[in-house]
Image (cartoon, grey):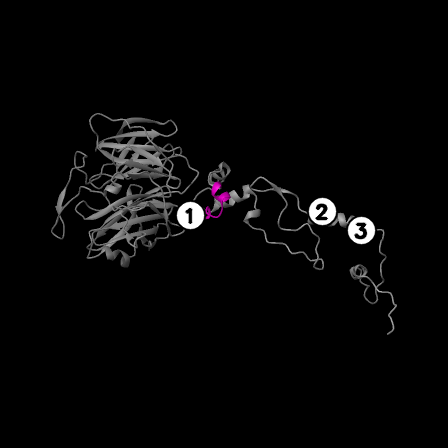
Amino acid sequence: MALDRSPRMSTQAKGVLSSHPSPPHGCKATPDVTKGEETQEAQGQRFQEHTLPEPRATMSGRMELSAQMSMAPPTNGGKRRCSRPGLGDIHEDMLERVLARLPPASFFRLRAVCREWRAVAASPTFLDACARVPSRHPWFLMLSERPHPVVAFDAAGRSWNACRAPTGSMPVAASGGLVLYSVLATGALCVSNPLTGASRALPTPPQGPGVPQLHAIAMYGSPYRVALFTGELPDLSMAVFDSSEDSWEGPMPLARRSGTSSPDAPPHGGDETVYFLSKSGDVVATNMKRSSLKQYSSVVVPSECGAVVYFLSHSGTVLACDTASRTFAELPRILPVHFEYSIDVVACNGASYAVVLSEYLDTASLRVWQFAEGAWRQVAAMPPGMAHGFYGKKADINCVGHGDRVMVCVSSGEFNGCFMCDVASNEWEELPRCINGDGEIIDFLAAFSFEPRVEINV
């Protein structure tokens, strides 16, 4: 057998030739090194500059190279495969900014991803990032007469979320991201953040002569203030707690603004009870008996120098107390005194409203009224087909507002339901039912609204 003595190319030589293919037909080959071409050493230096990333600091504090590209040169014909970047490659400061923008419910769920994410909740820079978020969608802290875990309704996510509250207490007011509680055993007041559970007890409020009757409790401002309204019409007083000074002021008497008494009010301006016979033959009293869950509730509308606090008197009229001028006014009634209805006051977008549930002409109506220019005017109404279900139920309503939304809790011995109204668009919807761990539906009677913020201190 004849031996092939022709010279053979080594594998390395083939690779060199394959990296320098012959020019296409009709083109002239260029020399290996020209005046404007980089040398092999320059090409190698440029390759390293473009492929090796700069070291960076990871969340654990170690200096590591990015895992997106390898230091080894490509071996698949010049093409490089890069792994997709993940959340683990984000710098800690950027990760905190991303987590701060999440809805609070989503953030609490994502804390279980890893220990680093769980530790973010206590990071001062993360809390600063949360404080830079201008506003958050409201949560509604729900109240029920039966014992149940503390839950809140997320208006944006339409979900029920667990919250924290001081043991043996009941919410009486809310402002911003804080809720004011009253200890059931002693009546002492304490402030708590429903998300973190942080709380503090307030000093004992000052007492006036005798034992004045408490009408309403309000919470407003930043730093927050707490106002207590006591006395009997027309002799009302106000005591204010300033959290920045950690002290109470008052009680201070409130003067009635002239010409503001209700036309149906008793001649002496008191809260005397008026009895009348209803169309069903029952004796009805005008004395308002509110649910114990919202016995001292009020709404606050900010003013230039302070705030105006609205709450219901025992006779069913709406009182407006100006904390700056230390005056109050009794607004006219929406419906005649000899009329059966349930009423509550709310605040939305810097304005006060009254929500009224009444029965007329064999049906029920639920309407929202705004007091402007000395008179009440209707701004929203529940669709008749939805409101007719309340007819004959002798239902009571407890309402709360936040932003454009008004939550209405309707309760009676035969019916319970919570509804949400967008005042600007007059759109109504019924909230989904809340079911506990035993599969039972929880019936809510009232609610308080707050802005869920983990960064707010008490």
The answer to whether residue 276 of the structure is visible from this angle is yes
Q: Residues within 10 Å of mark 3 (few under 14, many from 20)?
A: few
Q: Which mark, by number, is residue 105?
A: 1
Q: Secondary structure at mark 1?
A: helix
Question: Is residue 117 part of the magenta span, yes or no?
Answer: yes
Residue extent of the magenta highlight: 110-119
Q: Seen in the image, is 6 located left or right of residue 128? A: right
Q: Which residue is mark 3?
A: 40
Q: CA distance from mark 2 to mark 1?
A: 44 Å
Q: CA distance from mark 1 to mark 3?
A: 57 Å
Across and down, in percent, residue 27 comes to: 83, 64
Indicate whether 208 appears above or below 402.
Answer: above
Q: Main secondary structure of the magenta part?
A: helix
Indicate whether 132 appears above or below 421.
Answer: above
| Amino acid type at image mark 3 | Gln
Which residue ends up furthest to the front in the rendered image?
1
Looking at the rendered image, the quarter that the C terminus falls into is top left
Across and down, in percent, residue 183 comes to: 28, 35
Which residue ends up furthest to the bottom in the rendered image?
1
Across and down, in percent, residue 226 comes to: 33, 33
